[in-house]
Amino acid sequence: MLRLTEIIGTASEPHIAERLHSLSHRGAVEYVTLRREDTSRKRLHVFTDRGTEGAIILDRSEQLANGSVLLLEEQRAVVVRLEEAPWLALEPRDAAAALELGYFCGNMHWKVRFVGEYLHISLQGPRADYLERLSHLIADGRVSVVGNE
C-alpha cells in the first residue's frame, strides 16, 4: 500500500507542472478522485485510476484540493482530482485576444471548453494560480474574468 503523507504542491505550480507534463508523456501520472467533501479529511483509504491502493495520512494543517500532488518521484506521480472540477470563465475582448488566450492556454496544456464566446479553463489547482498566470492578459483588458465560479 502506498503511503501518501504530505501535499508536495499543486499541479498548477510551474515547476511541478513541468515534471507532471513529462511524466504524463510516459503514462506515469496516477490520479486519486475524491468527492469535494472528502478534501477536509486527513485520513483516507484510496485507489488511483490505475488501481494502486493507497492511504492518505495528512497533518491537521494540510488541506487537500483539486490538483494536490501527493507523490512526485522520477518514475511516478499521484495527483488529486475532484469529481467535478471548478471552471474559470474568461471573455476575450476581440478575435486577436481570443487567439492569444487560446494559444497561451494550449501552451500551458490546460483543459478548456468553449461556451459561446467564453473560454472556460478547468481548474486543477487554486484559482489564484491561474489568475496570476493570466495576469498579463487581464491587466490590460484583453481578457475579462466572467463571474466568480
Image (cartoon, rainbow, N blue to C red):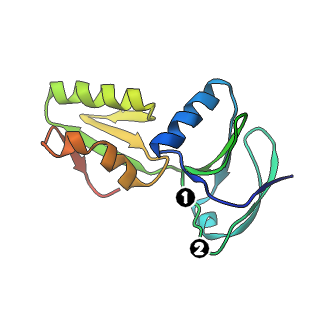
- The percent coordinates of residue 79 (x first, y second) are 63, 46
Quadrant in which the C terminus appears: bottom left
Helix, strand or loop for disc 1: loop
Residue 58, picture quadrant: bottom right
Is residue 69 shown above or below 98?
below
Say whether residue 128 is left or right of residue 116: right
Q: For the point 36% across and 55% down, which residue is it? A: 128
What whole-number distance in Å separates the C-alpha atoms at marks 2 and 1? 13 Å
- The percent coordinates of residue 122 (x first, y second) are 44, 43
- The percent coordinates of residue 107 (x first, y second) are 39, 27
- The percent coordinates of residue 97 (x first, y second) are 18, 30
Is residue 64 shown above or below 120?
below
Camera-side residue: 105 or 148? 105
Q: For the point 59% across and 68% down, which residue is it? A: 62
Q: Residues within 10 Å of mark 1 (few under 14, many from 20)?
A: many
Say whether residue 100 is left or right of residue 47: left
Helix, strand or loop for disc 2: loop
Residue furthest out toward the bottom: 60
Q: Which residue is mark 2?
A: 61
Q: Amino acid at mark 1?
A: Ala
Q: Which residue is mark 1?
A: 65
Between marks 2 and 1 in the image, the one whose residue lies nearer the viewer: 2
Q: Residues within 10 Å of mark 2 (few under 14, many from 20)?
A: few
Residue 44, picture quadrant: bottom right
